Image (spheres, grey):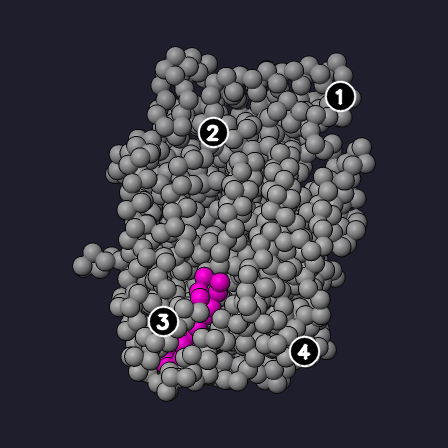
Amino acid sequence: MPYIPHTQEELHEMLSVVGVRDLDGLFADIPPEMRPKQFNLPKGQSEAAVCAYFEGLAAKNCPDIMSFLGAGYYAHDIPKAVDALSGRSEFYTSYTPYQPECSQGTLQAIFEFQTAVSRLMGMDCANASVYDGGSAIFEAAMMAVRATRHRVLVVDEAVNPIWRVMLASYISSLDLELKTVKQEKGVSRLDALMAAIDDTTAAVIVQNPNFFGAVADYTQVFAKAREHKAFGVISVYPVMQSVLKTPGEMGADVAVAEGQSLGMPLSFGGPYLGIMTCRKEHIRQFPGRIVGRTNDLDGKTGYVLTLQAREQHIRRAKATSNICSNQALCALRSLIYMSLLGPCGLTRLAENNMALTRYAVERLTAIKGIELLNDAPYGNEVALRLPMPAQSLVDALAAHGCVPGYPLGRYYPGMENVLLLACTERNSRQQIGMLAETVGGLL
Amino acid sequence: MKTIFAKSVPGRSAFCIESEAPKAADMLPAGLLRKEEPRLPQCSELDVVRHFTGLSKLNYCVDANFYPLGSCTMKYNPKFTEYVASLPGFTRLHPMLAQMGRSVGCTQGALECLYQAENMLCELTGMKAFTLQPMAGANGEFVGVKLIAAYHKAKGRNPKKMLIPDAAHGTNPASAALAGFEAINIESRDGMVDPDAIVAAIQKYGDDVAGLMMTCPNTLGLMEVHLPRIVAELRKIDALLYYDGANMNAIMGKMRVGDVGFDVVHLNVHKTLSTPHGGGGPGAGPVGVSECLVPFLPAPRVRKGQDGAFYLDYDVPQSIGYMGPFYGSFGIMVRALAYMLRLGAEGLTRASEYAVLNANYLKKRLEKTLDIPYANRLCAHEFVASAPEGTRALDIAKALLDRGFHAPTIYFPLIVHECLMAEPTETESKETLDSFVQALQDIMLQARSNPQALLDAPVTLPARRMDETAAARNMILTEDMG
């Protein structure tokens, strides 16, 4: 009996203490008519057999295909120490730190995470994390709605379309309105964003670099939002944030991120990490768990879950969010990752990947018919206009064991010929050379 | 312990890429760059390893301590599932590779995992279909109530009331509110949902009742014996039944929620299916539905084609949309699937049998030590107790910590006085339960002989009781705020 320690003797002794004849007697409150109509799950298997089954499934995937696919989720190298430390039983098999005296490890780690992401974003404070980058945007929007009592969310069309669909889905049964401001050739239109803000605006939501890889300064947009008592909300890519102007410097109220690139494997879509930071004055509107520093009875520094009056287990229907937990282990991984790289490591990583992307642009735009979609500054991702549908190029290159990027037509009708290409440290100049030669050969 | 920031030494880095790349300032306009580099920790690899190893030692965890936290199902997490989820064929897979069309057919193994997981969850619960998209239990609740809203909207109705028992987890009313419903509190009777209170609510609100959210067995650890009548009453007005899967570990193989009339269910795979709790996430909260809700499920659905190949189907016209970025917490679902395959029908049934056995044994052994309401009834996988007259649940919890046990859940559910809620799970042995009983007996003796000792507990841990009032008042939430 896997994972069940009871011997037959113990079983009988315990049954007699409880006063039932057999195990099924414990379920007397479930009458025959409420028992399962069927229960046709397969028979259990040995550990080795289950492992072999998954080894077989994993072998059907080809994760190490040469890929220039980013679109908000990036293939980064993860130092092995991240797995080793986050995999320690004490982190891995504990739970939400309700009892601080025996959970100081988790609590201090979250406090350090809150510090690290606040500093990265140039913001005052952070929560203990939410599910992912998309739900972080939703939670930020709801903060704004509660604080301003306004009902219109102005969203840049150049925000990751997956997150925009999530946002629309999440708010669909609430009395809120989503006003989407069109991008132009992959560039966020600051003037149009500003023109869309008025006294009904709860928040203006932008992304930097935007989904197309373009970098901008949203300071004016946030200033306009403030004039109308609206929130400025920005989503960033944490690796690039090591070099880019911070949300804090731009005057954002809430800054969020998908934290996957900070030590989370791509893992086919999750689990990921939603990072949320904000300005101090909005702290009481914050969703989810927050850790604070205090002293214990002996005056020793320690950490606790704090400001819990905002949360569902206290406030129930009136809570700032329905979130019960956070992504503690993912937050821990990101903290370990940031601690290993440090400012120098994260900055050089961003610069390395930006340089690779520039080399890819140089090589690919040298091919007749391929050009940059726009002339905006970009980070490690860029939109390229092709002389053919991007999906056709993807199909053609599949035979060569290469994925050149993300075809944008899926989410941006009219951009069927545009490819979104990203480089990370898992790409190389040699790979880029091969990509350019193959594409050149096809065109 | 000093923070990692306090241990930093300027100029150190454990991991800095060797690169010929120019500086950011040579690639981007100055106005787009940050003024100073981020003040992240500066450490050697050993500095980092020592720091986090040191932090880890300050935690209790299932691998080292009995952790009977009620409603959380802190059972043992088999080690092999971590190996399975760590296979590079899974971890290095970009989710969008599955959206690149059939030419890029390199995600078949991963899609098969999702397909298998959905099928097995359907059989486990008796539901028609599952979405694996929700990223946690509470996220699953939100998806579930959104589905209920979509169902009524498709019928041209807009009911606004969600019935929620007073013993429910706080996430239930919070999730309902987030989806635009008004939570209507249903008072319990005899520790169960009172069917007469349901009838009264239906009479009062009529067609404005969208549904009922139930936890079964409930948070008091009691089976809801009036369930058939409750289902019948809600059916009369075409309101839907939501099953909060927090306590699913009590009924596997004994009751399928789909068979008894529930329309929507979320599972907490980190509880029932033994994926690690990770200090509070990541978990996963897949949602199962009955026939009438299938059209509204989030997109995409994973399908198997005529040729046996798996694909993503985004053509779900009545879908409530995207509730997560992709196909769910894949790495967590892989672990859950591995656990289900390892145990099979018989093993999962046994898990529930022994979880319930352990809870009833513990409850029986503690009858003379704590005040146990509903003592004459069998409990499910967990039970509630009140701290005896003159003692507080909080102090008993702290005294347990001193004796090497994690405390039960305290002060929940709110309807039980000085509540302690214990859930031993099936993976704990009789001697562990006996030593826990012994510890509680010692604590109650001490409460009489030396009450101050209880108020002082814990004294053996890295930290004493914390000043939580000061924490809320001073709001030191980062290294830079204090």
Q: CA distance from mark 2 to mark 3?
A: 55 Å
* Position of residue A396 in the picture relative to residue B439 (left or right): left
Chain at tag 2? B
* Position of residue B200 in the picture relative to residue A406 (left or right): right
The residue lying toward the viewer, choosing from B24 and A212, is: B24
Chain at tag 1? B
Mark 1 residue type:
Ala
Q: CA distance from mark 1 to mark 2?
A: 30 Å
- Secondary structure, mark 2, is loop
Q: Position of residue B366 (x, y in %)?
A: 56, 18
Q: CA distance from mark 4 to mark 3?
A: 35 Å
Q: Which residue is mark 2?
A: B425
For residue B31, the mark is 4
Marks 1 and 3 share the same chain: no
Q: Which residue is mark 3?
A: A434
Q: Which residues are magenta?
A: A409-428
